[in-house]
Image (cartoon, rainbow, N blue to C red):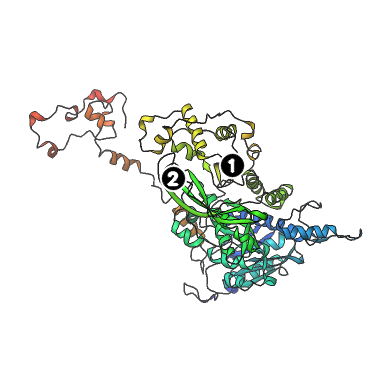
Amino acid sequence: MEEQTQGLRNPGEMENGTEPCGEECASEAQETTVTEGAAKIAFPSANEVFYNPVQEFNRDLTCAVITEFARVHLAAKGIQIKVPGEKDVQKVVVDLSEQEEKNAELKEGANLAPEDQPRTAAVGEICEEGLRVLEGLAASGLRSIRFAREVPGLQSVVANDASARAVDLICRNVQLNGVAHLVHPRQADARMLMYQHQKLSERFDVIDLDPYGSPAPFLDAAVQAVSEGGLLCVTCTDMAVLAGNSGETCYSKYGAMALKSRACHEMALRIVLHSLDLRANCYQRFVVPLLSVSADFYVRVFVRVFTGQAKVKASASKQALVFQCVGCGTFHLQRLGKASGASGGRVKFSAACGPPVAPECEHCGQRHQLGGPLWAEPIHDLDFVGRVLEAVSTNPGRFHTAERIRGVLSVITEELPDVPLYYTLDQLSSTIRCSTPSLLQLRSALLHAGFRVSLSHACKNAVKTDAPSSALWDIMRCWEKECPVKRERLSETSPAFRILSVEPRLQANFTIREDANPSSRQRGLKRFQANPEANWGPRPRARPGGKVAGGAMEERRRLHQNKRKEPAEDPVQRAARLKTFPCKRFKEGTCQHGDQCCYSHSSPAPEDTADVAPGDRPETPYQNPPGPGMANGPGVD
């Protein structure tokens, strides 16, 4: 992932007070060359410009999505694109907007002469009617250069960054890759640049925002600078905020309260979509999600932006609040608005009625937390996702992470589009303190009961289903009867006790069904990525002069790994600490370890027994030292 570095525009005005250093001061030994996709990038080894190799999946997926978007965009103009490695077969284009559908119909109805050949657009060539792309936070320019060398049908690519050092690096990399005719470096504040392109004739067809942390400061300008039906690509790496660790911060950035939940990754996607649509509504525009992905330590959304006052009125009915029980985790959605049919084919918009829950949870009696608003409509366009999946599957050599893209998109096509959020296997079983059923057993029980169920790409053990929460807990009650828990150990006020105290109305059938195993799982696709490298994750923020670099940065990352976990205790220190506790078995006269016992066998301190009369002292075994015959036999620590 590249991003806009935080340095000042003037290299001489750096925070550390050093003098400006030109290219003559940098030796070849201080630079690193990276080859990714069809691009070759040279960047300083010092942490002056941001680069994260783990984000290669993000960049590969973006190239694949923009390629299919270019295919749709140019097909309406009668232009076909040529993708390297793809067979020369004309693809069937499914338009994604009514306007493009009309244009395609007009084009198909035109009488073309047999000798007329359709126009084509190839990679690396300027297409006069092609896409105008903006990368607002370009850093090293890797993403923009990959667009120029891998995506056909482009008119121009603006690689912008606020840092003068980053722009110099972009210029060098553009010359290194020979794409100066397509990629135009620009030094400006990304927000001001997008605000300057609000006119219809100056808007960008594709805007890519991949900042360090939250993209919130750039969203208002982005929804105004993207063209009608244009593509907006946004990455958010502030997952701690979006996942509910700081709800008030999430509200200040995205206008929604995030909750701590097992479904926090999908909730993060829906919060970002809500924020995009809310900002677009201010300008009579609205968003249509194409693809929303939660991967690694970030979320990535691809949306199209349209204008229409009538469609904007329906935005309130697309948002919802979330009522989540703090005890059992059961959630309910409450729409903010209501859209209903009226006479004459009109649509009537009104306020929704609620809330959908009582003050206390119907299952465990605990209170509810209120989260949102969040996007409650589908977060993917399954037709578009299927076309991207087909293009990657038929041309796997195009991307280094093609196997993972294929697996993730396959799971996305299997998700239930009209079911927001999900439960997890471990959440359901830990709530009632029972053993965990297998994924196929729970899915089969839901299918036998007549409900739909699917996985989620955002969580490996997710259960996304249209079954009501009462049916889901009935299935878990039936499972507990097969694997009973010790009820006497449960507190009467615990969610487990209250849920299990109710007899199930639904009799679950856990017989494995053939359709319970999803296709992506049967084919063994790479659906969920393992850690790609040691100490992987978000990289440190780029700083002027590269203050944290090289081995020092790696050592710092290593030290911060698992910093919230207690360090392993030294065995000698542990033995000394345990010797400070009296042995309960020794007091009862049943400890057989003798001197080998890890607890203390010492007599009670004199001050503890000084106030007790000799005749009142109980004759307990711990007042006498252990005999030699007590060293054998079983014992416990």
Q: Is residue 136 visible?
A: no
User: Helix or strand or loop: what does disc 2 sit on?
Assistant: loop
Mark 2 closeness class: few <14, some 14–19, many ≥20 residues within 10 Å? few
- Number of labels in the image equals 2
Q: Mark 2 belongs to which amino acid?
A: Ala
Q: Residue furthest front?
A: 343
| Residue at 52% across, 29% down | 507
How far across and how far down the image is residue 199, in percent? 66, 72
How far across and how far down the image is residue 393, in percent? 71, 47
Query: Which residue matches tag 1?
Result: 455
Q: Quadrant of the C terminus?
A: top left
**Viewer-side label of 1, 2:** 2
Q: Is residue 606 left or right of residue 65?
A: left
Foreground of the two, 250 or 603: 250
Q: Is residue 305 visible?
A: yes
Look at the numbered discs 1 and 2 and tell me whether their residues touch, using CB distance below 8 Å. no
How far across and how far down the image is residue 285, in percent? 62, 64
Q: Is residue 159 above or below residue 625?
A: below
Q: Mark 1 belongs to which amino acid?
A: Leu
Q: Which circle's residue, 1 or 2, is located before the other in the chain?
A: 2
Residue 358 tag number: 2
User: Helix or strand or loop: what does disc 1 sit on?
Assistant: strand
Foreground of the two, 26 or 553: 553
| Residue at 15% across, 38% down | 605
How far across and how far down the image is residue 487, in percent? 38, 30
Per the model, the C-alpha gap separating discs 1 and 2 is 29 Å
Residue 100 tag number: none
